[in-house]
Image: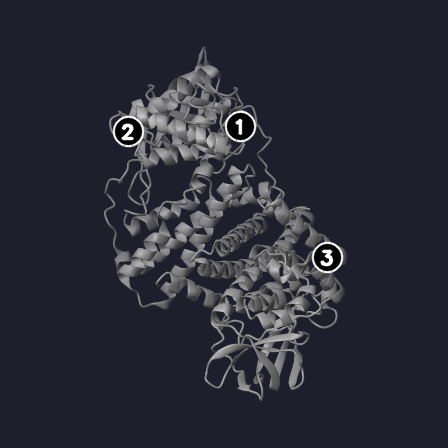
Amino acid sequence: MDTKEHVLESEEHQALRHAVRRLLERHGKGGADLTDGQAGQVDLDLWGRLANEIGVCGLAVPEDLDGAGFGARELALVAEELGRRLLPSPFLPSVAMGTQLLLEAGDPAALEAHLPALLSGTRRATVLLPHHGDGWSVEETDIAAVRDDGSGYRLRGRVTRVLDGHAADLLIVPARAEDGTVDLYLVTEFIDVARRAQPSLDHTRAFAEVILDGCAAVRVAAPDAAGAIDRAMSVAAVCLAAEQLGVAQHLFDAAVKYAKDRHQFGRPIGSFQAVKHKLADSLLELELARATVNDALGQLESGDPSARRAVSVAKLVSSEAGYVVCANAMQVFGGIGVTWEHEAHLYFKRASTNRVLLGRPGVHRELIASSLSL
Amino acid sequence: MPATEENLALIRKQVVRLLTENPPEDTPRSDFLGAQFDAGLAWVAFPEGLGGQELPHELQREVFRLLDEAGAPNAQVSNRLAYSMGAPSVQTWGSEEQKLRYLRPLFLGERWCQLFSEPGAGSDLAAVNTRAVRDGADWIVTGQKVWTSMAELSGRGMLLARTDASQPKHQGLTYFVLDMSAPGVEIRPLRQMTGEAEFSEVYLTEVRVSDQDRLGPVNGGWKVALSTLMNERDMFGTKTTEAGPVEVAMRLYHEERPRDPSLRSRLVDLWVRGQSLRLYAAQAAARSAAGTPGPEGSLSKVGFAELNKLGYELCLDLLGDEALLYGDYDAEPAVLGSPPRADTADPRLLFLRSRANSIEGGTTEIMRNIIGERVLGLAPEPRIDKNVPFAELRG
């Protein structure tokens, strides 16, 4: 297994990476198969294996909650491998976003009720962020929460483009109460909920429109919902950045191989400088992006005060680099690169949508600018 | 070989002793450097008696860190070319007699310059035309070198010359350590677009060079030159702690307070790019220390060159109409033979100087070829001159 980009990884991390990669290689769908059927359709069998044989859902869950007790770095590692394979999975919405949010919110009742099923992969969560491109500020939520008789609530509103919204079992909904405060609410019963899959640009991701029409919900008792969301989505953003690295690295490696195999004018096309230089530049972008993801993970681990900025740097740089590298790779592939049949478009489309999820580049740029007092 | 806690502690003890026995404030520079050499702290990886102790190379960084803290002389900074390029070449290719003769004086301050490039041999360095013709125990050298830094201050020059034109270009070259004070060596300043002359042209007219100053085998000079160049590329790639265009742009932004939002946007992007490159270089240094070096030198070189050009373009835009004027094209450089420093020089000078960053020390195009071929394994372009005797080549 060629992992020269991970030479400094610990043996444990290499073992985890190897385990995930091997499982995906043996069982995952690849290439053009991904365009069959509904976008982002999850192979439940494979998801179950990832959850139970490797424990991906519990990697960042503390041991006293039956998790593995690791952290963002391990989640990011798995995300990267899933990205390489372009596996449609609920990892981002359910593990990186949903589970992390429940942990950060810290409501014991909510954790007791939902964590076990999330850990085993039998249930999937998703977070109904009002917008993807604008980042994870929930102040603009259009969902209203009204106190029900008893201790419950009823939610009313509409969110579109919810990741895995059609199939998720647990909706984590930021909603505004009558007094104006925004809190998190949990929906597990799909009465008075209409969910409609939306056609996705990226064949490997599922988006849905979710209409909450007075459905029952339980409020998450979190002393600081905004803080919990920020911390959880920061981890998710670095995971997405790592996933983007995996996506781009796969297509880049494929393009380099193509440049060696494809002959025109009597020689491999990689021997022409224009092609060679494009790939050399792509390597630089990948390596720089990787460095920013490593730095963000390190700062999150050490609780560095500038970790939030490092997360935005990693998300910004990886989003852009991943996209550009995929675009360059597609160019190297020439005609076949733009066909339905070839895998290039699948990676390109994923890289493209990843630029929007969890904050488009401009949003992260703005946070960085503010942190530099500009 | 990576450093260990043990030998790190040993090094620290030795440096402490060096500083105690030779307090920098009271010790003449060359005495201090002599003591450092004799203590095996000049290049710790070199053999004993030649400035080293055969310890891991990574420990040298710690030596200089401690010396810098104590305000002691730093040969790597003050005599960079000789220390980082000349000495490793001598160590790899020199005879024991040559190592004994060259290394200590070099470390004590004898400057070395590079005599590689010629008007007709830049990216295609193997195409050098300067001839060395055997004459008894000596060689007679005639030719012209260009882009030589520090020529006027240098005691010796690393010279690549052609010794057999009947061989293909790579196979008829020999490397010499030239005595710059020898008769026939003429140095002329080479003025750049900035107005400064950091470099010189060096004219060699029948200069007599002893065969004892030949480094490496006759007609085997290409490999020696390559090892010198490898060290040069690493030098360029790792300047991560000096101020650069990001710092200058930040300062100008705060001074000028521009209203144009696109300038703010470009500044953030510049900062992010600079940050990415610094993180990459720092993590690469860690990989290198762990014994698993990668393509970092070449990638960093390309990255920093483009950052400099982009960054100083932004600086110029931040200056507004001031960008129409200049300081003084006739001014002397701040430090002879050195490029202007970002923390003190006029941004307009830095802007002009930055254009050469993607050309000197290996053009960005050559670096991309190296990355593509040696790192990614892509096929080289067909070379039509590789196996043709040099004397038969045209142009």
Q: What whole-number distance in Å separates the C-alpha atoms at marks 1 and 3?
A: 53 Å
Given residues B198 and B111, the one toward you in this image is B111
What x and y, as percent, mark residue A5? Answer: 59, 47
Circle 3: element type: helix
Question: How many residues crowd mark 3 within 10 Å: few (<14), some (14–19), many (20+)?
Answer: some
> Secondary structure under badge 1?
helix
Circle 1 chain: B
Amino acid carrying label 2: it is Pro
Instruction: Name the secondary structure under disc 2.
Output: loop
Which label is found at residue B223? 1
Q: Using the image, determine if residue A198 lies above or below residue B83.
A: below
Relative image position of residue B104 (x, y in whole percent): 38, 21
Extreme residue in the bottom direction: A149
Mark 2 sits on what residue? Answer: B24
Image coordinates for residue A333, horizontal then vertical, percent: 65, 56
Find the distance from the CA under tag 3 to the CA under tag 2.
62 Å
Name the quarter where the C terminus of chain A is drawn: bottom left
Of tags 3 and 2, the one toward the viewer is 3
Q: Is residue A54 left or right of residue B342?
A: right
Q: Nearer the viewer, mark 2 or mark 1?
A: 2
Residue drawn at (33%, 41%) of the image = B339
At a point 33% along the width and 37% down the height, the residue shown is: B69
- Residue drawn at x 36%, y 26% as measured from the top left: B17
How far apart marks 2 and 1 lie (CA) works out to: 39 Å
Say which residue label 3 marks.
Answer: A53
Say if mark 1 contacts mark 3, CB within 8 Å.
no
Give coordinates of residue B323: x percent, y percent. Answer: 28, 57
